Image: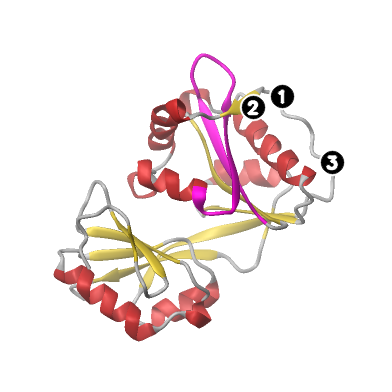
Amino acid sequence: MSTDQPLHRSSSGVRIRTDSQCQSDAHLRPTLPAGKLRSDEIKTTLQLLAQNGVQRVFTSAITSQEQDFFRDIGFELHEELILLSHDLSAQIPPPTRPTRRARRFDWPHILDIDASAFSQFWQFDAIALTEAIKATPKSRVRVNTGPSPQGFAITGRSGRQGFLQRLAVHPTHQGNGLGRSLVADALRWLQKRRVYEVLVNTQIENATALELYESTGFTQKNDGLAVLRWDAKR
């Protein structure tokens, strides 16, 4: 395997990309259920990454079953996340701030917003943004209506399961209802398509995001998510 490409689809049931800012870091996302992954193939992939200079591999936010698999092959906890669910059983209030479909020329603004709203580890680059949009069979990207985007939301749908993949508002425009409007816009779009559940995750210490989600009808699930890390030198 060569890591000179920013994105690589492995035959071992995972998608791996090297970090655009730090080539010694890589990000791994399972593309198969944990029961169909083979530990020997994943271990071989990790060793090939190490031979190409990768020192740390981070998983995406994965479920408890997936965590058990990766812990068994040497991954350790990097960060726990809160998983929340919305059943869309109640009527969703309309957004108070107008939004529109994001276009390709909005992407630089979207990436700037993302960089301002998240710590470096969680920030999107152009590849990660593309991955988030393509993570589900159906998706949409919305930004606020106006001279330039100040916030954005990526919403995904797979059958009757919905996902609020990403939500970010520039710090200078937080607190004016834009985040709430983007959430409402996403929920109403999913509700019209008869989605039965919407999932979103956030960092444990992100009290602002947690308060927003819970105030818009999301409730915390008992089974959270986590990001795990594998260290080549360990």
Q: Is residue 12 left or right of residue 154?
A: left
Residue 40 placement: quadrant: bottom left
Instruction: Tell me the residue that label 3 is attached to.
Output: 91
Q: Quick check: marks 1 and 2 in contact, CB under 8 Å?
A: yes
> Which residue is pictured at 47% across the width and 74% down the height?
67
Which residue appears at 79% of the width and 34% of the height? Answer: 93
Distance between the alpha carbons at the discs numbered 1 and 2: 7 Å
Which residue occupies 43% across, 43% down?
129
**Quick check: can you spot residue 79?**
yes
Looking at the image, residue 193 lies above or below residue 48: above
The relative height of residue 217 versus residue 41 in the rendered view (above or below) is above
Picture coordinates of residue 150, whole percent (x, y): 50, 25
Kind of residue at badge 2: Gly
Category of crowding for the residue at label 3, using alpha-carbon neighbours closer than 10 angstroms: few (below 14), some (14–19), many (at least 20): few
Residue 196 drawn in magenta: no
Q: Position of residue 192 (x, y in %)?
A: 79, 43
Farthest residue, direction right: 90
In the image, residue 141 sits, relative to residue 71, either above or below, namely above
Q: The N terminus lies in which quarter of the figure? A: bottom left
Residue assigned mark 1 = 96
Query: In this rendering, is residue 150 above or below 51?
Result: above
Magenta residues?
Answer: 134-158
Callout 3: helix, strand or loop?
loop
Q: Of the residues shown, which amino acid type is indicated by label 1?
A: Thr
Q: Residues within 10 Å of mark 2 (few under 14, many from 20)?
A: few
Viewport quadrant of the C terminus: bottom left
Count of marks, rendered view: 3
